[in-house]
Amino acid sequence: MAKTKSSKKIATQQSDSAYFLKLVLYVIVGSQWLWITTADGASQIPLPLGFVIGLMFASHDHFQIDRKIEYAVLLIGAIISFWFQVGIFVNL
């Protein structure tokens, strides 16, 4: 008889408090914008810097079970913070 290797994956679970903390951190990171304004204040360019960084974090996460939820939390945090104008302001 030939030996066959059974590929057993040990499912690691994440605690509820760690998952909640991760969602809170995604909201905080996703809410960071880089606002660039000209010296005369005529034009303002918002860049979703935190959203892009959060997407990189979510794509390299160890527990990739709920990636869609993490993307949705990032998007909601970015949209809400766009209207409240949260982030870094740079005047050129």
Image: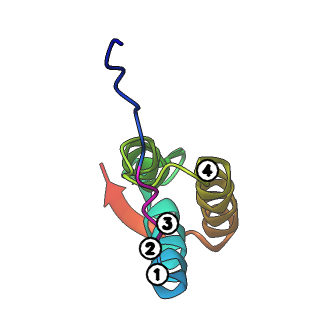
Q: Position of residue 18 (x, y in %)?
A: 44, 80
Q: Position of residue 84 (x, y in %)?
A: 64, 74
**Mark 3 — residue?**
26
* Residue 18 covered by magenta stretch: no
Q: Which residues are magenta?
A: 10-14
Q: Is residue 30 above or below residue 57?
A: below
Q: Are marks 2 and 1 in contact (CB under 8 Å)?
A: yes
**Mark 2 — residue?**
25
Q: Is residue 73 above or below residue 8?
A: below
Of 40 and 15, the residue lying toward us: 15
Instruction: Estimate how packed mark 2 is, as few (under 14), some (14 to 19) or many (20 or more) residues with alpha carbons within 10 Å.
Output: some
Q: Report, in whole angstroms, how far the alpha carbon at label 3 lies from the one at label 4.
A: 9 Å
Residue type indicated by callout 4: Tyr
Q: Is residue 89 above or below residue 55?
A: below
Determine the main secondary structure of the stretch shown in magenta: loop
N-term-proximal mark, 4 vs 2: 2
Q: Report, in whole angstroms, how far the alpha carbon at label 1 lies from the one at label 3.
A: 9 Å
Residue 2 appears in the rendering: yes
> Which tag is nearer the camera, tag 1 or tag 3?
1
Q: Are marks 2 and 3 in contact (CB under 8 Å)?
A: yes
Residue at x 40%, y 31% (from the top left corner): 6
N-term-proximal mark, 1 vs 3: 1
Residue type indicated by callout 3: Tyr
Residue type indicated by callout 1: Leu
Instruction: Estimate how packed mark 1 is, as few (under 14), some (14 to 19) or many (20 or more) residues with alpha carbons within 10 Å.
Output: few
N-term-proximal mark, 1 vs 4: 1
**Mark 1 — residue?**
21
**Mark 4 — residue?**
71
